Amino acid sequence: MPLELEYMKGFTFGWLNKKGDFIKSEAKESLRLMKERTNSNYAIFALVALQDTPHSTHVDYKGDHMVADEELIGMIQYARSLHMKVILKPTVNCSDGTWRAHINFFDLDVPCEPKWHDWFKSYTEYQLHYAKLAEAMNCEMLIVGCEMVQTERRSNEWRELISSVRDEYTGLISYNTDKYQESNVSWWDAVDVISSSGYYPIDDWERQLDRIEQEIASYDKPFFFAEAGCPSRKGSSYLPNDWELSGGVSIEEQARYYEAMIEHTRKRPWVRGLGLWDWPGLLYKEENAATDDGYSVYGKSAERVIKAFYQQEL
């Protein structure tokens, strides 16, 4: 029998927040507002470890670039007090600015060159740290990677990592592949829930949903979009994954994108939720929303679109 998954009305919270940010009163107020103004029932805490370059083998999850365990635990407890469920998503970025999808090494070990097994050893240590925390805090899900396209061909290593995580964590496990890459992962059978990033052009949702449905059908696993969203910027509805796109502020274009995404995904019963991108841990002032061109929906028209959807029985 396939796993039954409730519809996840999710939002990513606190991306790029650093040590000390979650103990600020503004962070708790931001989470409260996220719940109140979007009716989200899942808080996705996305954490950001660092490695120097896409070819470095050490993943640093202990520096000041990470919120401390104690403050993360405090925010999880606060999310519980708001009657929210919790997903932990330990992610990695490259300090040199290279997108994590390009983390890559030679498939054959070569002397004096960085190696896959060294990277996976460090990355697994990182995931196990948060697997133990997720287990202690009874988190509903752990997402063990995000958009790591070049690593995905290393099926054996990913299977070993997931097996090790299961030794520490008894909740649901997912992996978040990137847009267009749903067929790139040959080890979906190892996770409980399939997820991907849904940054698809506003006029291409139907075609992409048809494709994804075919590509994941054989695994008989629940699916959700662990990331999905659009900046409030002219042109972004056609390139929602491009956070550097040039264009003036357009609150209306962001709202139109959310309307379209919701319209198309809600008709697909196999899509079991959204993990929208993203709600800042430290918010700008609401009066500045009209000049903000980022992914945040706080104080914007898209916020009302999302709340109207998330208030429905799904």
Image (cartoon, rainbow, N blue to C red):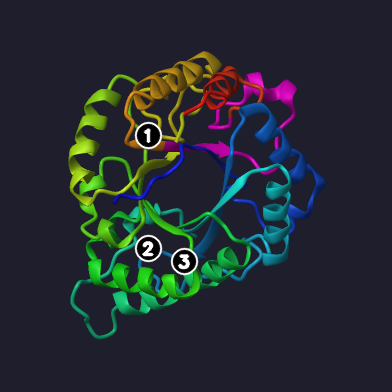
Task: Determine the residue positioned at 34% across, 54% down.
Answer: 101
User: Are circles 1 and 3 on residues that touch, CB within 8 Å?
Assistant: no
| Amino acid beneath label 3 | Asp
Q: Position of residue 15 (x, y in %)?
A: 58, 48
The residue pinned by badge 3 equals 52
10 Å crowding of disc 3: few (<14), some (14-19), many (20+): some
As drawn, the label of residue 199 is 1
Q: Position of residue 169 (x, y in %)?
A: 49, 68
Is residue 24 positioned above or below 163 on the image? above
Task: Determine the residue positioned at 77% across, 39% down.
Answer: 29
Q: Quadrant of residue 267?
A: top left
* Alpha carbon distance from label 3 to label 2: 7 Å
Q: Give the secondary structure at mark 1.
A: loop
Is residue 101 positioned above or below 269 on the image? below
10 Å crowding of disc 2: few (<14), some (14-19), many (20+): some
As drawn, the label of residue 57 is none
The residue pinned by badge 2 equals 54
User: Are circles 1 and 2 on residues that touch, CB within 8 Å?
Assistant: no
Q: Give the secondary structure at mark 2.
A: loop
Q: Position of residue 250 (x, y in %)?
A: 52, 17
